[in-house]
Image: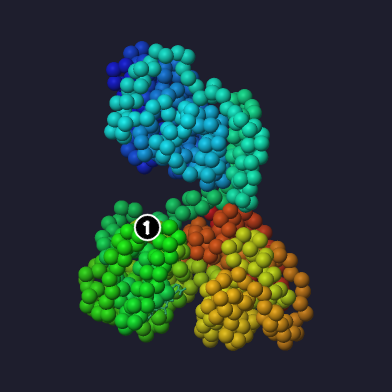
Amino acid sequence: MTALYQVHGDVATITLNNPPVNGLGLATRLAITDGLALANADSAVKAVVLTGAGKAFSGGADIKEFGSPTATQEPNLLSVILALENSAKPVVAALHSVAMGGGLELALGCHYRIAAPGCSVALPEVKLGLIPGAGGTQRLPRVLGVEAALNMIVSGEPVKSELLAQLPGQKLFDKMAASAESLMQEALDLARAMADVRPLPLVRNLPCKHPLGDAYFQFARNMVKGMSKNYPAPGKCVDAVQAATKQKFDAGMVFERETFINLMWTPECRALRHLFMAERAASKVPDVPSDTVQRPIQSVAIIGAGTMGGGIAMNFLNAGIAVKMLEMKQEALDRGLATIRKNYESQVKKGKLKQDKYEQRMSLLTTTLSYDELKDADMVIEAVFEEMGVKQAVFKELDRVMKPGAILASNTSTLDLNTIASFTARPQDVIGMHFFSPANVMKLLEVVRGEKTAKDVLATVMGLAKKIKKTAVVSGVCDGFIGNRMIEQYGRQGGFLLDEGCTPQQVDRAVEKFGFAMGPFRMGDLAGNDIGWAIRKRRYLEKPDMKYSKTADLLCEKGRYGQKTGAGWYDYQAGKREPIPNAEVVQMIEAHRASLGITPRKISDEEIVQRLVFSLVNEAAHLLEEGIAARAGDIDMVYLTGYGFPIWRGGPMNYANEVGLFNVVQAMNRFARNPLDDAKFWQPAPLLARLAAQGKTFS
Ligand code: NAD
């Protein structure tokens, strides 16, 4: 049963029971209206209490129902709320733990509300590119006042019940329960006390005004301007709450409904909903059951205290997991330790970390020069130099000392994980954990599944990723894994664009206008142009006929590696990250172009963006077909959390779906005819060609 109906003398209770958060799917909605009908038909019952079992009153819509026809099937949420309002017997909502979205709207349809302290109350629809769609924008201002309600609706952020209860004049809660334990008894008492009071109070009948009238809403619009730049929903939240102050309740409801439905059809809303689902899907591995028993991880060893090792260590310390770092020399350990301290101290200075928390974290960190001291760790992550010989020596040592069942992870970004695993007698325990730099900041973690990686090892690392607050995406073994294999093609296009007539600024500007956090040349300067240089040297030994622009090599030959050398595609002032265009670099590009006999042409921003983004999409289609990535949504998560792809576009694959795969292929065919580009690369990946021909999308 998705809701339990019980009678306690003269009061009936309807207890939502749809774990984990009592989502309001069709069965739950039906159970509520059925319970109400029973209560109203039973002459012994004088009042009703509506509450939720387990960990929530209700978290709102049932995500399992997202996009399915049952989501709007009657009784839809609006009809359930109407049934509550029209109940002849008073209904008391007893809120605890979580009352969000549709759950809060449901409570606002009840005659009375009582809340336990600590209940998180929110209307988070704006985070999915929507406004509340079941009366939230019309009822919440009536009980909280316009300003508090608008703040909650525009931010989507939860506020604790005890704080809301302190707002002067609030009518959201008729009573605060003393505790979560006493909530039900107090709700039953309230129901009994109100059983005979008539008329029944309805939120819709309360007045809704702001003393400043339209001026206030103008201020509010100015306030949300920044956040509305790429998203229509925040501005529409203001419109809907303003409608509550200007129109009769029912007209306001119509306005809310129309606005909600219009927003549903915006690309931004589709992108945000896609991400919501993609994020949840990415944490699941198709052939690894969710109940796979995970290995306990209480302590982690890290080999190498350099750039990555230090950042990786911080993730575990932040999560309260003990870390032991190993290096070859004491100086290297001291340096690594000092960097970690410096990072934490800067957080303390900025007020982002309390001193005692900092000390607590540092107390979990120990160091060693001896492999034998790692034998008790549940897991080890290797972050040493990117050379197979070095990895081999390290993994042989790890195989010798680590206890049976310990997980052996490598942070390699380019080397073959299966080869690394073969250096041990336990390849089933070996896995890749590809963190991104700075590892203590970047959300993305590519979890690299080797040929022999055991399912429980994969399940454990996916679980651990959640604990250290990373977005984990599983990748198969290939050069560059998901993210970097795609970015190589993007970088190659960037080079062709320079050869054909662009400047780095023009390309970066176009891509940043599209919404990327950073264009490809600024990104190269941040990551270090020498990294790509090293990859190209290797790549063009393997594939000498692969076309690419030599400009980036020329740049590196000048020692312009990027921010770390103060000069790359741009110049940088010491300690600053703002790119300053450099005339010599432009001359270098022009000279190279001339040496190739190319007459520069003006390239539109649209062409720049399409060539760069579709190069990601085509490579991604190959990754999907090869089974390196399991789902298009996983690829989107990689790009959104690791590469600064604009969130409101939902990732490269979602963007391609929005453009239409037919149109993507058409554009690629055009690019293939450009003699200065790589016609072979622009051959649509078979999967992309097939989907485009069938009029389908990546989802
Ligand atoms: P780094 O040079 O900053 O650090 C490597 C550290 O490993 C050094 O402190 C070195 O002393 C130590 N080391 C080397 N050999 C060792 C050994 N045999 N035993 C113990 N310690 C040893 O390098 P990094 O940038 O931290 O990269 C480390 C790994 O992470 C590489 O595999 C790299 O490909 C990968 N990675 C790097 C980045 C990045 O952006 N830097 C991103 C993702 C992954």
Q: Nearer the viewer, residue 277 or 208?
A: 208
Q: Which residue is mark 1?
A: 354
Q: To which quarter of the image does residue 130 belong?
A: top right
Give left or right: position of 339 versus 109: left
- The relative height of residue 32 versus residue 372 in the rendered view (above or below) is above
Q: Residue at x 66, y 36 (%)?
A: 215
Q: Position of residue 305 (x, y in %)?
A: 36, 75
Residue 186: give x, y in percent of width and height: 32, 26
In this image, 351 relative to 660: left or right?
left
Question: In the rendered image of this protein, does residue 356 appear above or below residue 135?
Answer: below
The scheme the figure's colours follow is: rainbow
| Residue in the foreground of this view, choosing between 346 and 207 | 346
Picture coordinates of residue 334 (x, y %)?
34, 77
Q: Quadrant of the N terminus?
A: top left
**Residue 350, quarter of the rendered image:** bottom left
- The image shows residue 409 at horizontal and vertical percentages of 34, 71
Q: Can residue 479 be seen at all in this image of the molecule?
A: yes
Question: Considering only vertical position in the picture, is 600 above or below 319?
Answer: below
Label 1: few (<14), some (14–19) or many (≥20) C-alpha neighbours in 10 Å: some
Question: In the depicted view, which residue is nearer to us: 615 or 438?
Answer: 438
Q: Nearer the viewer, residue 277 or 131?
A: 131
Q: Quadrant of ligand 1?
A: bottom left
Q: Amino acid at mark 1?
A: Lys
